[in-house]
Image (spheres, rainbow, N blue to C red):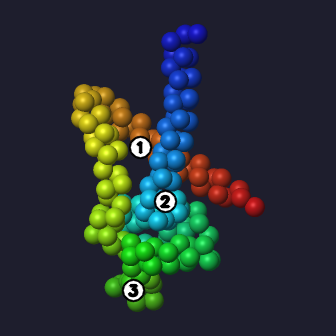
Amino acid sequence: MAKRATLLDDSARLMRDFMSSAVFFQDVVARAAGLTASDLQTLGVLVSEGPRSPGELAARTGISTGGGITQLVDRLVKAGFVTRERSEQDRRRVLVTPVLEEVGRRIGPLYAGVGADWQSFLESLSTAELETCVRFLATAVEINRRHAAEVGDTEA
């Protein structure tokens, strides 16, 4: 097999392995924090992107806008990870806001080891390698989001 074909095969296999190991790791972290995997991922969206309405969270995560997202937000509120607040611009609108101090205190330590290992690895890369890595990861995120939306649109 030509080198390029071998690299393409290896890349496909490693992408599958990376994605499944990431899902399993996130599940372990969620359970350690007393959350479901969906709770943890939604909390991650809020930490990364800031306050969102329940409808925006539903659209971003693919969780139903009815009872599903409401129950998820209820669990996060009860756990102390988020608050519900009225929007300053539109008092009719409710925003779900992460309690960053609580997230950092209770969930941050669960990511400390893997974060340090990734930081060490990334710092070992040359600038050109790091640019390639950033381009690869950004593309992977875009591809996964696009296909998650497509699969979500086809669910019965």
- At a point 45% along the width and 41% down the height, the residue shown is 139
Query: What residue is disc 2 on?
Result: 31
Local crowd size for mark 3, using a 10 Å CA cut-off: few (<14), some (14–19), many (≥20): few
Q: State left or right for residue 55 relative to residue 155.
A: left
Given the image, on which type of amino acid does mark 3 rest? Arg
Task: Specify whether 137 is left or right of 112.
Answer: right
Say if mark 1 contacts mark 3, CB within 8 Å: no
Question: In terms of sequence position, does the residue under pointer 1 or pointer 3 come before the other?
Answer: 3
Disc 3 is placed on an element classified as strand
Q: Position of residue 19 (x, y in %)?
A: 52, 41
109 vs 43, left or right, is: left
Q: In 3D space, how far apart are the residues under numbered discs 1 and 3 (Cα atoms)?
A: 33 Å
Q: Amino acid at mark 1?
A: Ala
Write down the residue under mark 1. Answer: 138
Asked if residue 8 can be seen in this view, the reply is yes
Up/down of 132 relative to 146, above or below = above
Residue 152 in picture, x, y percent from top left: 64, 57
Q: Which residue is mark 3?
A: 86
Q: Is residue 27 above or below residue 54?
A: above
Residue furthest to the bottom in view is 91
Q: Could you tell which of marks 2 and 3 lies nearer the N-terminus? A: 2
